[in-house]
């Protein structure tokens, strides 16, 4: 599986205050998730639900009739915020190697283009092969 993400730098979101409802002490990204949810219409996705994991926060959503998961987290070593984009595929698509996410994925690009117009620094696409 390959992981595609949009990374950027900003001091707009919390990286120091650990809230009681955090699963662990590095579970930052709740305010970034809320910020993106508030911009779902201009980006063009529909929220199904959201939640917290031990690594950060996520939104299960739909875009162009496809299901995705958006993950939100902070990488302190790089002082970087990250939005991971995971495209869900059917069993048949997985078995036949179809509908894989690529660097041209429409939701990935929509998020990237929107963030480039936002007050963040060093907005970039990132790819991590696994």
Image: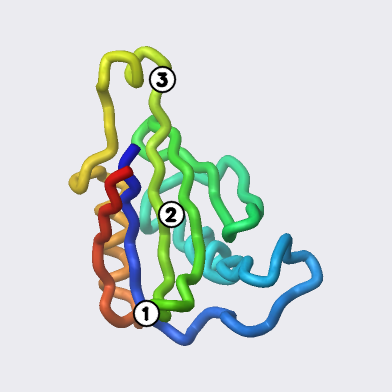
Q: Which residue is mark 3?
A: 90
Q: Mark 3 vs mark 2: which is more N-terminal?
A: 2
Q: Residue at x 35, y 82 (%)?
A: 119
Check disc 2 and report its element: helix, strand or loop: helix
Q: Quadrant of the C terminus?
A: top left
Image height of 69 relative to 128, above or below: above
Q: Which residue is mark 1?
A: 9
For marks 2 and 1, the one nearer the N-term is 1
Q: Is residue 81 above or below residue 113?
A: below
Residue that lies at the very extreme toward the right in this rendered image:
20
Q: Name the residue tied to disc 2.
A: 41
* Residue 58 placement, left or right of 106: right
Within 10 Å of disc 1 (Cα), the crowding (few <14, some 14-19, many 20+) is some
**Could you say where residue 121 lies in the image, as x and y percent from the top left?**
30, 82
The residue lying toward the viewer, choosing from 35 and 85, is 85
| Residue 18: x %, y % from top left | 71, 77
Report the residue at 36% width, 13% height from top: 92
Q: Residues within 10 Å of mark 3 (few under 14, many from 20)?
A: few
- Which of these two is toward me, 124 or 49? 124
């Amino acid at each position: 599986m390959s992981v595609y993400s949009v990374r950027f730098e900003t001091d707009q979101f919390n990286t120091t205050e650990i809230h009681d409802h955090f699963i662990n002490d590095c579970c930052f990204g709740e305010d970034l998730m809320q910020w993106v949810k508030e911009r779902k219409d201009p980006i063009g996705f529909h929220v199904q639900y959201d939640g917290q994991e031990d690594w950060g926060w996520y939104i299960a959503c739909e875009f162009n009739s496809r299901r995705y998961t958006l993950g939100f987290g902070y990488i302190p070593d790089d002082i970087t915020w990250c939005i991971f984009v995971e495209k869900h595929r059917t069993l048949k698509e997985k078995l036949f190697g179809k509908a894989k996410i690529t660097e041209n994925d429409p939701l990935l690009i929509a998020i990237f283009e929107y963030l480039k117009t936002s007050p963040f620094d060093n907005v970039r696409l990132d790819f991590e092969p696994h």
